Each structure stands twice: as structure tokens, then as C-alpha cells.
Image (cartoon, rainbow, N blue to C red):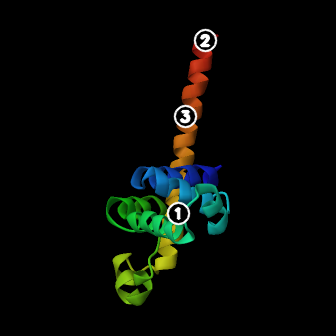
């Protein structure tokens, strides 16, 4: 259930920060596991154009607000985190980056479970009022 929630949040970010064309091509390739050649046949453009559109959409997700939102929601570790490992170690209160990510993921899971319980309680209260 948590994985499905994460996927929906991820694809919501992709939809918000990419154009319709970029979004549809990225989804075809990454969700539907279609090759670029298959997308080319469907879209009727060259494989180079499909590659350009896909790369442009992915570039949008790697910069600005999209990047910040992805990093915040999913605690994605960039390659740069490994370059200066001692700095990262010190930033997280003498916890390694891997430990920090594991702890942060556990916190997010607990937050999700708490929110889920709140929604279930609200739904139960709504059912009681109806009875």
C-alpha cells in the first residue's frame, strides 16, 4: 500500500513538472515498459525526437522545484552525497548517509501510517453518523 502511495506521488510530480507530450512519453517508457521504437511507431515521429522529448522531461525533473520536491518526498540520494561522505556524515549528526536514509524512510512510513489511521477514523465517524 505504501509503495502504491509513493508511486502515485511520484507520477503526480512527473505530471506537474513535465509537458503533456513529455509526460506521455515518459510514462510509456517507464510505466508501460515500452521501447522507444514502439513509442516511435505509435507517435509517428523519429526515434531521435522521442529521445529528445524524454531527455527534456527528465532534465526538468532533475532541476528546480521538481528536484527539491522529489528530494524532500523520497529522500533521493544523489551521487554527490558519496563524494564528500565525511561532510554528509557530520550533517546528519554523525550518522552515515545510509543510516540517515533508513531512519528518514522509517519516519515517513510512520507518518503515512498515522495519516492512514486518521483517515480510517474519519471514515468510521462518518459511517456512525449515517446509522
The residue depicted at 42 percent of the width and 50 percent of the height is 16
Is the residue under label 3 in contact with that under label 2 (CB below 8 Å)?
A: no
Q: Is residue 42 above or below residue 62?
A: above
Q: Point out residue 85 in the picture as x, y percentages from the top left corner.
A: 41, 87
At x 51% / y 77%, what residue is drawn?
98
| Residue, disc 1 | 105
Q: Which residue is mark 3?
A: 119
Q: Residue at x 57, y 30 (%)?
A: 121
Q: Earlier in the sequence, mark 1 or mark 3?
A: 1
Q: Is residue 27 in sight in this rendering?
A: yes
Near-viewer residue (75 or 30): 30
* 85 up-or-down from 121: above or below: below
**Quarter residue 34 falls in:** bottom right
Q: CA distance from mark 1 to mark 2?
A: 38 Å
Badge 1 element = helix
Of residues 64 and 45, the one drawn nearer to the viewer in this rendering = 45
**For residue 125, side relative to residue 65 (left or right):** right
Labels 1 and 3 touching (C-beta < 8 A): no
Check the image and report above or below for 96 versus 41.
Answer: below
Residue 71, horizontal then vertical, whole percent: 42, 65
The label on residue 130 is 2
Q: Which label's residue is closer to the chain start, 2 or 3?
A: 3
Instruction: Give how far apart the Cα atoms at labels 1 and 3 are.
Output: 21 Å
In-front residue for pair 108/31:
31
Q: Are marks 1 and 2 in contact (CB under 8 Å)?
A: no
Task: Specify the label residue 16 is tagged with.
Answer: none
As helix, strand or loop, the secondary structure at mark 3 comes to helix
Residue 43 in percent (x, y) is at 58, 56
Residue beneath the point at 51% across and 75% down = 99
Disc 2 secondary structure class: helix
Amino acid at each position: 500500500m505504501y509503495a502504491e502511495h509513493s508511486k502515485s506521488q511520484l507520477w503526480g510530480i512527473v505530471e506537474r513538472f513535465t509537458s503533456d507530450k513529455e509526460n506521455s512519453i515518459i510514462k510509456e517508457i517507464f510505466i508501460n515498459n515500452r521501447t522507444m521504437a514502439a513509442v516511435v511507431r505509435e507517435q509517428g515521429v523519429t526515434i531521435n525526437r522521442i529521445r529528445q522529448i524524454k531527455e527534456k522531461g527528465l532534465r526538468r525533473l532533475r532541476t528546480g522545484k521538481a528536484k527539491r520536491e522529489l528530494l524532500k518526498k523520497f529522500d533521493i540520494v544523489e551521487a554527490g552525497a558519496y563524494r564528500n561522505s565525511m561532510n554528509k556524515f557530520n550533517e546528519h549528526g554523525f550518522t552515515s548517509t545510509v543510516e540517515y536514509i533508513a531512519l528518514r524512510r522509517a519516519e515517513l512510513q510512520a507518518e503515512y501510517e498515522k495519516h492512514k489511521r486518521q483517515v480510517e477514523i474519519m471514515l468510521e465517524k462518518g459511517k456512525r453518523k449515517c446509522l
